Image (spheres, rainbow, N blue to C red):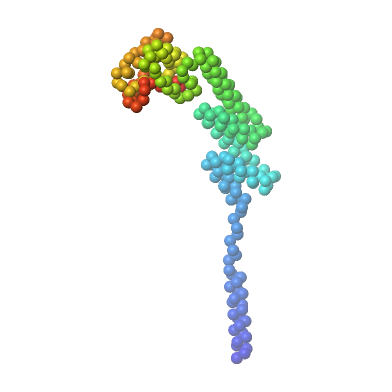
Amino acid sequence: MKSFTSRYLLIAAFLLLGACQSTPPAAEAPDARATAIAQLEQSLASSELATAEDQLAALQAQSPNDQSLEQYQRQLAEAYLMRSQIVLQKGDVNAAATALARARALMPKAPALTGGVNGAIAQARKAELEKAEAALKAAEAKPKAKVIDPTAESTTVALNITDMAKLRRQLDAIAADVVNYQCDVSIQAPRTDDYPWLANLLTKRVNKLDPQFDLKLERQIIRSVPAQMVLSPRKP
């Protein structure tokens, strides 16, 4: 009986050992480097260039001598260069310069690749400077404003309709600013009858200063306000 039991236990032990040996090994953890490269490639494909730059820097820090990463560095530089060209065509010179700087930092040994965009940005900067200088000269050439604030969206001038001498002087000043600063005019008055004669007085003065000026008048009857004119310089 004891011999049978011993044999039974021995067989059971062998079976258990075999079962343990036949258990498949645990799946190996995925390659972290391969995952990081896949994420980098996805960022490049999605034009998430800042993210791709960070991912590339992390990979290069882990494997500073890995020559295979150079292709990704070049791809990223070319993507920045393309972005620079696109935003420059849209007129955003600052964004173009920023993207170009990133491209040049990523491929300092190939300055010729960025030369064309760099020249285009320089030309755009020059054009912006010339435009600003022309605007400044034009502003300096204009006579000093008499009633408006040239930097404001609009200026409201209350009219002295009870004193004709003062009103005439006011309208002379208003007409000068309208012509010199290319203003649209809104005539606001509490009574409907006030608009025609005020519009006529201003129109005569503007035509005298510049017969070709396209005077644009708006009528607003507002019972709660005194007679006034709102001058709005036209945007260039």
Position above or below: 19 against 72:
below
**Percent x, y for residue 131?**
54, 20
Q: For the point 60% across and 59% down, which residue is it? A: 28
Q: Quadrant of residue 31?
A: bottom right
**Percent x, y for residue 225?**
36, 25
**Percent x, y for residue 162?**
36, 16
Q: Is residue 179 visible?
A: no
Residue closest to the eye, 212 or 26: 212
Residue closest to the eye, 86 or 189: 189
Residue closest to the eye, 234 or 92: 234
Q: For the point 66% across and 44% down, which residue is it? A: 60
From the viewer's perspective, is 194 left or right of 111?
left
Give the residue furthest to the left: 193
Q: For the point 65% across and 30% down, which residue is it? A: 111
Q: For the point 70% across and 44% down, which residue is it? A: 65
Give the residue furthest to the bottom: 1
From the viewer's perspective, is 112 left or right of 136?
right
Q: How many numbered discs?
A: 0
Give the residue furthest to the front: 162
Q: In which quadrant of the rendered image does the N terminus lie? A: bottom right
Position above or below: 27 against 168:
below
Q: Is residue 132 visible?
A: yes
**Percent x, y for residue 188?**
36, 22
